[in-house]
Amino acid sequence: MFSAFRRAATELTIFHHPSSPPSQKALNLLRSAVSGPFPPDKPSSPPLDYKLEVVESPPTRDQLRTIVDFVSPVGKQNSAISASSLFLSAHPSTPTGSETPQSVSAIHDLGTKNPNALKWPIVVDWNAGQASIGDVEGVKNMLETLRKRRDGELPKDDNADQPKGWFS
């Protein structure tokens, strides 16, 4: 009877770098989707309902590990994706070759010292276990999934009120 009270609100976090154009574009998309009609080309549509957290620093080591799990779950064909290929940008200041950090801790340390070395934005839906790294299209896909859930176009998930990832 009161199961609706248990349902966790969708939480999206954008790890944002203000000087990154893709990060700026993603932040604008996320803000407009929660404050105006979504999709924007349908003015009669309501906004999406989620809590947006904007963080202007790299994710913590634990958050990076969780994001790696979201992007390449165990048992999937792409599980061999390295953390460095996920998070490191092609910026000239990013170490290459044998100097490329391989561990999540080393990537975190590099991102803290040199934010340009990371791909921005990093957007995470903690409840659904989804993440988009350095890709505005991935953010659009996340928003479209939220729209489909709102509009009843996705099948009901019996565990929808159970968070995934490091919340569980």
Image (cartoon, rainbow, N blue to C red):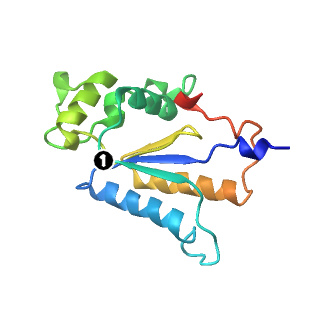
| Residue 70 location (% of width, % of height) | 51, 33
Q: Quadrant of residue 5?
A: top right
Q: Residues within 10 Å of mark 1 (few under 14, many from 20)?
A: few
Q: Residue at x 45, y 55 (%)?
A: 137
* Front residue (pair 36, 139): 36
Check disc 1 and report the residue beneath it.
56
Q: Nearer the viewer, residue 30 or 154?
A: 30
Residue 42 % position (x, y): 60, 76
In the depicted structure, whether residue 49 falls above or below residue 126: below
Which residue occupies 31% across, 30% down?
84
Tell me the quarter of the image containing the N terminus.
Answer: top right
Q: Position of residue 39 (x, y in %)?
A: 57, 68
* Horizontal side, residue 162 vs residue 15: left or right: right
Give the residue at x 40% y 26%.
62
Residue 139, placed above or below residue 59: below
Residue sticking out furthest to the bottom:
43
Q: Is residue 47 left or right of residue 140?
A: right
Q: In what element is the residue under mark 1?
A: loop
- How many numbered badges does the structure rendering display? 1
Q: Determine which quarter of the picture holds residue 157.
A: top right
> Can see residue 32?
yes
Name the residue type under label 1: Glu
Q: Nearer the viewer, residue 121 or 138?
A: 121
What is the x, y in percent for residue 119? 30, 43
Q: Residue furthest left?
A: 93
Q: Quadrant of the C terminus?
A: top right
Asked whether residue 102 is in view, the answer is no
Name the residue: 48% across, 25% down.
79
| Residue 25, quarter of picture | bottom left
